[in-house]
Amino acid sequence: MVTVLVCLGSSCYVRGSEQIAATFEQLIEKEGLQNQVDLRGSLCMEHCAMGVSVRVGERVYHQLSPEGADKFFYNEIVPLARES
Ligand code: FES
Protein backbone atom coordinates (compact mmCIF):
# COMPACT_ATOMS: atom_id res chain seq x y z
CA MET A 1 0.00 0.00 0.00
CA VAL A 2 1.39 3.37 -0.98
CA THR A 3 0.05 6.52 0.65
CA VAL A 4 -0.52 9.50 -1.63
CA LEU A 5 -1.14 12.86 0.01
CA VAL A 6 -2.39 15.69 -2.19
CA CYS A 7 -2.03 19.12 -0.61
CA LEU A 8 -5.42 20.81 -0.36
CA GLY A 9 -4.09 23.91 1.38
CA SER A 10 -5.30 27.18 -0.11
CA SER A 11 -2.27 27.88 -2.30
CA CYS A 12 -2.27 24.42 -3.86
CA TYR A 13 -6.06 24.37 -4.05
CA VAL A 14 -6.18 27.48 -6.25
CA ARG A 15 -3.61 25.84 -8.53
CA GLY A 16 -5.87 22.85 -9.11
CA SER A 17 -4.92 20.31 -6.45
CA GLU A 18 -8.52 19.19 -6.03
CA GLN A 19 -8.65 18.37 -9.76
CA ILE A 20 -5.40 16.47 -9.44
CA ALA A 21 -6.83 14.45 -6.54
CA ALA A 22 -9.98 13.75 -8.59
CA THR A 23 -7.86 12.53 -11.51
CA PHE A 24 -5.88 10.23 -9.19
CA GLU A 25 -9.13 8.89 -7.76
CA GLN A 26 -10.51 8.08 -11.20
CA LEU A 27 -7.28 6.41 -12.30
CA ILE A 28 -7.03 4.34 -9.10
CA GLU A 29 -10.47 2.98 -9.89
CA LYS A 30 -9.73 2.48 -13.59
CA GLU A 31 -6.55 0.54 -12.80
CA GLY A 32 -8.10 -1.43 -9.93
CA LEU A 33 -5.58 -0.12 -7.42
CA GLN A 34 -8.01 0.61 -4.59
CA ASN A 35 -6.17 -1.84 -2.31
CA GLN A 36 -2.71 -0.59 -3.28
CA VAL A 37 -3.14 3.20 -3.10
CA ASP A 38 -4.32 5.12 -0.05
CA LEU A 39 -5.27 8.54 -1.46
CA ARG A 40 -5.76 11.37 1.03
CA GLY A 41 -5.95 15.12 1.14
CA SER A 42 -3.44 17.01 3.23
CA LEU A 43 -3.23 20.33 4.98
CA CYS A 44 -0.57 22.77 3.77
CA MET A 45 2.79 21.02 3.36
CA GLU A 46 4.60 24.33 3.74
CA HIS A 47 6.02 24.39 0.23
CA CYS A 48 3.47 26.87 -1.10
CA ALA A 49 5.95 28.73 -3.31
CA MET A 50 6.73 25.53 -5.21
CA GLY A 51 3.39 24.88 -6.88
CA VAL A 52 1.07 22.00 -6.05
CA SER A 53 2.73 19.54 -3.68
CA VAL A 54 2.03 15.81 -3.54
CA ARG A 55 3.66 13.23 -1.28
CA VAL A 56 3.99 9.69 -2.59
CA GLY A 57 5.29 7.41 0.14
CA GLU A 58 8.28 9.24 1.60
CA ARG A 59 8.91 11.50 -1.38
CA VAL A 60 7.42 14.95 -1.93
CA TYR A 61 6.90 16.29 -5.45
CA HIS A 62 6.17 19.86 -6.44
CA GLN A 63 4.74 21.84 -9.34
CA LEU A 64 2.11 19.33 -10.32
CA SER A 65 -0.59 20.52 -12.68
CA PRO A 66 -4.04 19.13 -13.48
CA GLU A 67 -2.87 18.61 -17.08
CA GLY A 68 0.07 16.50 -15.98
CA ALA A 69 -1.76 14.52 -13.31
CA ASP A 70 -2.34 11.37 -15.34
CA LYS A 71 1.27 11.20 -16.54
CA PHE A 72 2.46 11.68 -12.96
CA PHE A 73 0.10 8.94 -11.79
CA TYR A 74 1.47 6.38 -14.23
CA ASN A 75 5.11 7.41 -13.79
CA GLU A 76 5.32 7.86 -10.04
CA ILE A 77 2.38 6.18 -8.33
CA VAL A 78 1.61 3.05 -10.35
CA PRO A 79 5.13 1.52 -10.10
CA LEU A 80 5.14 1.89 -6.31
CA ALA A 81 1.57 0.63 -6.03
CA ARG A 82 2.32 -2.46 -8.12
CA GLU A 83 5.35 -3.41 -6.04
CA SER A 84 3.54 -2.88 -2.73
S1 FES B 1 -0.91 25.05 0.33
FE1 FES B 1 0.12 23.34 -0.49
S2 FES B 1 2.13 23.55 0.27
FE2 FES B 1 1.06 25.19 1.17
Image (cartoon, helix red, strand yellow):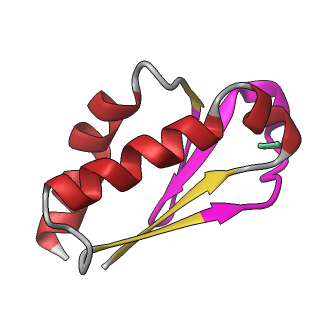
Report ligand 1 position as a quadrant. Answer: top right
Which residue is at 47% across, 46% downward? 22
Which residue is at 57% across, 47% downward? 54
| Residue 22 higher or lower than 37, as above or below | above
Q: Residue furthest top?
A: 67
Q: Quadrant of the N terminus?
A: bottom left
Locate residue 58, reporting x and y percent. Answer: 50, 65
Number of disc labels: 0
Dividing the picture into quadrants, the one containing residue 38 is: bottom left
Which residue is at 26% across, 49% downward? 27
> 79 left or right of 21?
left
Q: Quadrant of the C terminus?
A: bottom left
Residue 60: say if magenta.
yes
Dividing the picture into quadrants, the one containing residue 40 is: bottom right
Residue 6: say if magenta.
no
| Residue 68 higher or lower than 59, as above or below | above
Locate residue 49, reporting x and y percent. Answer: 83, 26
Locate residue 60, reporting x and y percent. Answer: 56, 49
> 35 left or right of 32?
right
> 30 left or right of 41?
left
- The magenta-colored residue range is 41-62
Which residue is at 43% across, 19% downward? 67
